[in-house]
Amino acid sequence: MVEIKRVTENERTSEFINVEFTNYATDCDVALNFEEFCFAAVDDGKIAGVITGRAYYNEVHIGDEDAVLQDKLQAHPE
């Protein structure tokens, strides 16, 4: 029996999604016209936060697992 459970996205789940999405697109002759991107907030040589996503022809999807460390925000108020 297949068990469905909520999990945290990680390298294993991300790879599964990318492989299956690419296989489906290949099987259905769909062009994958997107660009992946990654921006990092760097403070004094250390990464304070990261935003990743994909840009399509008319939309942008930003990963919801991306975050800026709370202590960095408090150290640098607006």
Image: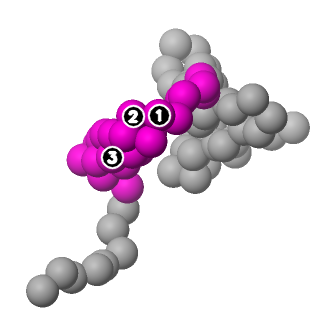
In the rendered structure, which amino acid carries the disc numbered 2?
A: Thr
Residue lying at the far right in this picture: please name it: 78
Q: Position of residue 2 (x, y in %)?
A: 18, 81
Quadrant, the N terminus: bottom left
- Label 2, label 1: how many angstroms apart (C-alpha)? 5 Å
Please indicate whether residue 58 sits to the left or right of residue 22 in the image.
right
Mark sitting earlier along the chain (2/3) = 3
Residue tagged 1:
29
Residue tagged 3:
20
Q: Position of residue 39 (x, y in %)?
A: 61, 24
Quadrant, the C terminus: top right
Residue lying at the far bottom in this picture: please name it: 1
- Label 3, label 1: how many angstroms apart (C-alpha)? 14 Å
> Which one is nearer the viewer's eye here, 40 or 72?
40
Whether residue 67 is visible to the viewer of this picture, yes or no, is yes
Residue tagged 2:
26
Mark sitting earlier along the chain (3/1) = 3
Residues in magenta, as a range: 9-35
Q: Is residue 16 magenta?
A: yes
Residue lying at the far left in this picture: please name it: 1
On the image, which quarter does residue 6 sit in?
bottom left
Tags 2 and 1 in contact by the CB under 8 Å rule? yes
Residue located at (64% from left, 43% from top): 62
Q: Position of residue 64 (x, y in %)?
A: 58, 52
> Which one is nearer the viewer's eye here, 60 or 40?
60
Please indicate whether residue 44 sits to the left or right of residue 60 in the image.
left
